[in-house]
Image (cartoon, grey):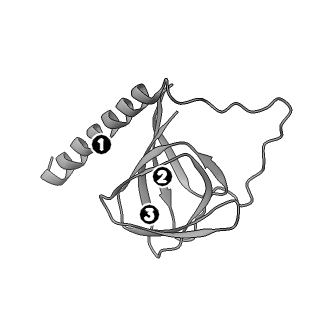
């Protein structure tokens, strides 16, 4: 195993451990949103075109590797609080329910924390974007 792979493995373990700490520490402070009985779920305006592979899922976190091909979009989704690490460089555009748009540039190795929010995301770059995402439940 070369040094780059060792660093990636160490980072992934550290990232997962940090997220578990957040999940355990924040579990008592976080209230879970519950759907109202009889409320219909809104259909996504855009089809989910991303390739999302679940690596780990339990009652605290969901860990995924998500791939966006050029032009691929996620559709409008509510996402929980999460930590994301870019495995490749890329550019996306987030569109929020109110129509507001935000350009996001990712560099390989970059890590971001994002709060719970609803948006669609489209790869506006020319190459596939790969994200490693740990979502808190």
**Are the residues at dot 1 and dot 3 in contact (C-beta closer than 8 Å)?**
no
Q: Residue at x 78, y 48 (%)?
A: 42
95 displayed left or right of 66: right
Q: Earlier in the sequence, mark 2 or mark 1?
A: 1
Category of crowding for the residue at label 1, using alpha-carbon neighbours closer than 10 angstroms: few (below 14), some (14–19), many (at least 20): some
Q: How far is mark 3 from mark 2, CA to CA? A: 8 Å
Category of crowding for the residue at label 3, using alpha-carbon neighbours closer than 10 angstroms: few (below 14), some (14–19), many (at least 20): many
Percent x, y of residue 69: 51, 65
Q: Earlier in the sequence, mark 3 or mark 2?
A: 2
Residue at numbered disc 2: 66
Percent x, y of residue 110: 32, 59
**Are the residues at dot 3 and dot 2 in contact (C-beta closer than 8 Å)?**
no
The answer to which image quadrant residue 119 occupies is bottom right
Q: Residue at x 83, y 40 (%)?
A: 40
Residue at numbered disc 3: 129
Q: Secondary structure at mark 2?
A: strand
Q: Residue at x 42, y 54 (%)?
A: 131
Q: Earlier in the sequence, mark 1 or mark 3?
A: 1
Q: How far is mark 1 from mark 3, CA to CA? A: 18 Å
- From the viewer's perspective, is residue 40 above or below residue 108? above
**117 and 65: which is toward the camera:** 117
**88 and 30: which is toward the camera:** 30
26 displayed left or right of 11: right
The answer to which image quadrant residue 86 occupies is bottom left
Residue at numbered disc 1: 12
């Amino acid at each position: 195993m070369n040094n780059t792979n060792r660093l990636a493995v160490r980072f992934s373990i550290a990232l997962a451990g940090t997220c578990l700490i957040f999940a355990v520490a924040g579990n008592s402070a976080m209230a879970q949103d519950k759907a109202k009985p009889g409320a219909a779920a809104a259909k996504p305006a855009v089809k989910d075109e991303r390739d999302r592979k679940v690596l780990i899922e339990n009652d605290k976190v969901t860990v995924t590797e998500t791939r966006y091909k050029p032009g691929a979009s996620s559709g409008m989704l509510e996402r929980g609080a999460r930590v994301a690490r870019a495995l490749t460089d890329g550019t996306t555009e987030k569109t929020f329910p109110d129509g507001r748009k935000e350009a996001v540039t990712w560099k390989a190795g970059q890590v971001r924390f994002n709060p719970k929010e609803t948006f669609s995301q489209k790869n506006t770059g020319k190459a596939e974007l790969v994200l490693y995402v740990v979502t808190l439940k």
